[in-house]
Image: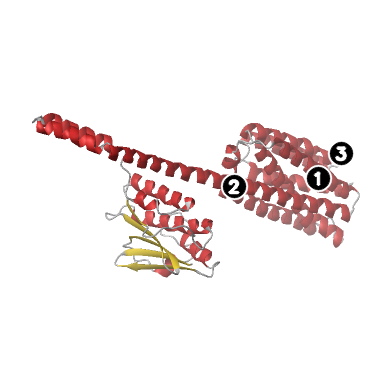
């Protein structure tokens, strides 16, 4: 029974580290983390003294309570299911690589000497911290909690099936430990790891799809607002002659005071319905995602009091590049332009999209009085912005390298930064 108790104590140790590195503050409050830690510590010491033969099953109440707490807190069964998947998978990977495989394949006795036992514990801690760090970074990078919480569909059946499957497979894993069977351990471990990767990939796809849907919804809403403004201005133009006739009546009667009031009322009324000049250019773009992005940045420019000039000399019906990749390049260049003009007296951004005979071109110009070498801007990790990772411009080059007929250039002409994207037709 010694191997089984050793496995329990090691899993308790890894669970404690995972609890404080990943779960604490992200999933649980400090008080809840302390209660769970106390449970694991008691289980750890019971395994050391080999008190009970059924200790392996003591993990199940721990995981079930964890599942229920998260389901209630976030009102999301997805969060409960995904967090459980990550924890099960990481615990088994750590146990398999640092203890089970060395013990069964190479007949390593981890209790032969203190240095060997110490090496086992250290390897467990290092691997656990590494995997926990990756998991925590992944959660924060993708805003997983916020996105899962905002998904209305609960996925109760799927989450419960995930819980049941992993508990059964975890039981099979401990059965393999009790029987000291390499085949059962490998089978259960492979099932857990592959299932963890599969379910994590599935939930990642759900998150990615949801994010894209939300972004499209926001962009469509922005475009809808501008379309409404366009309809209002069309109505205003239709009534324009009547407005002028009314004003002419005041002037002909010599009532200049009321004429002046009427002019002010026209100005107040029209200020809310006039649309920016760039919207007329948007009508030449038939690709809705690109049109929505440009409309969104046009609104952003108005809110920040930045002159946004859009030129589309020709109709844009298609481009020989994946739309998602093109939008990634477009948004990086626009973000870079917005950052550059903030605080400048000449805050003008000019965007030109044009179809030529053999190629399509995107050109973005903005004032740039900085003296930073262009080669420096293209380096991965470099940024002129504080606390910024600086992956934008280097990422554009990376995306363009995936296409044979796509070229990307930047240059600085008379204190003007010019970025061009050329796509062959």
Single out the mark in the foreground, 3 or 2: 2
Of marks 3 and 1, which one's residue comes earlier in the chain? 3
Residue 128 left/right relative to 370: right
Q: Residue at x 67, y 33 (%)?
A: 69
Q: Callout 1 environment at 10 Å: few (<14), some (14 to 19), or many (20+)?
A: many
Q: Callout 3 environment at 10 Å: few (<14), some (14 to 19), or many (20+)?
A: few
Q: Nearer the viewer, residue 128 or 207?
A: 207
Question: What residue is shown with label 1?
Answer: 170
Q: Residue at x 83, y 39 (%)?
A: 57
The extreme left residue here reads: 254
- How far apart, in angstroms, are the residues tagged by discs 3 and 1? 14 Å
Q: Are marks 3 and 2 in contact (CB under 8 Å)?
A: no
- How far apart, in angstroms, are the residues tagged by discs 3 and 2? 43 Å
- Dot 3 falls on a residue whose secondary structure is loop
Q: Are marks 3 and 1 in contact (CB under 8 Å)?
A: no
Question: What residue is shown with label 3?
Answer: 54
Q: Residue at x 82, y 58 (%)?
A: 101
330 over 248 or under it: above or below? below
- How far apart, in angstroms, are the residues tagged by discs 2 and 1? 31 Å
Of marks 2 and 1, which one's residue comes earlier in the chain? 1
Question: What residue is shown with label 2?
Answer: 209
Asked where in the image residue 44 lies, by quadrant, the reply is top right
Of marks 3 and 2, which one's residue comes earlier in the chain? 3
Q: Position of residue 333 (x, y in %)?
A: 43, 58
């Amino acid at each position: 029974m010694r191997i089984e108790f050793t496995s329990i104590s090691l899993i308790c140790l890894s669970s404690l580290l995972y609890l404080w590195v990943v779960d604490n503050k992200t999933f649980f409050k400090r008080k809840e983390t302390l209660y769970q830690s106390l449970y694991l510590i008691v289980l750890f010491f019971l395994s050391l003294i080999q008190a009970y033969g059924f200790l392996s099953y003591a993990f199940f109440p721990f995981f079930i309570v964890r599942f229920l707490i998260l389901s209630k807190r976030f009102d999301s069964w997805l969060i409960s299911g995904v967090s459980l998947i990550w924890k099960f998978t990481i615990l088994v990977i750590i146990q398999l690589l640092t203890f089970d495989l060395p013990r069964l394949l190479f007949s390593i006795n981890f209790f032969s000497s203190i240095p060997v036992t110490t090496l086992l514990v250290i390897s467990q801690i290092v691997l656990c911290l590494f995997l926990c760090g990756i998991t925590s970074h992944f959660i924060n990078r993708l805003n997983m909690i916020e996105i899962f919480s905002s998904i209305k569909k609960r996925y109760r059946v799927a989450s419960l099936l995930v819980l049941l499957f992993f508990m059964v497979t975890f039981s099979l894993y401990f059965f393999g430990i009790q029987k000291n069977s390499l085949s059962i351990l490998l089978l259960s471990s492979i099932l857990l790891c592959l299932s963890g990767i599969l379910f994590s990939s599935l939930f990642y796809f759900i998150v990615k799809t949801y994010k894209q849907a939300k972004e499209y919804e926001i962009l469509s809403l922005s475009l809808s607002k501008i379309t409404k403004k366009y309809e209002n201005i069309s109505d205003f133009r239709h009534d324009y002659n009547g407005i002028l006739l009314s004003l002419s009546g005041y002037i002909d009667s010599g009532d200049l005071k009321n004429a002046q009031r009427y002019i002010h009322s026209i100005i107040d009324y029209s200020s809310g319905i006039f649309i920016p000049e760039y919207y007329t250019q948007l009508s030449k773009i038939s690709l809705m995602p690109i049109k929505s992005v440009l409309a969104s940045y046009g609104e952003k420019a108005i809110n920040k009091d930045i002159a946004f000039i859009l030129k589309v000399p020709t109709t844009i019906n298609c481009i020989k590049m994946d739309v998602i990749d093109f939008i990634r390049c477009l948004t990086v260049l626009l973000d870079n332009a917005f950052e550059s003009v903030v605080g400048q007296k000449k805050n003008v951004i000019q965007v030109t999209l044009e179809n030529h005979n053999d190629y399509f071109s995107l050109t973005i110009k903005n004032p740039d009085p900085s003296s930073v070498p262009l080669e420096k801007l293209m380096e991965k990790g470099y940024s002129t912005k504080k606390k910024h990772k600086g992956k934008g411009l280097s990422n554009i080059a990376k995306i363009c390298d995936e296409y044979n007929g796509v070229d990307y250039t930047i240059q600085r002409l008379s204190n003007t930064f010019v970025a061009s994207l050329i796509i062959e037709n």
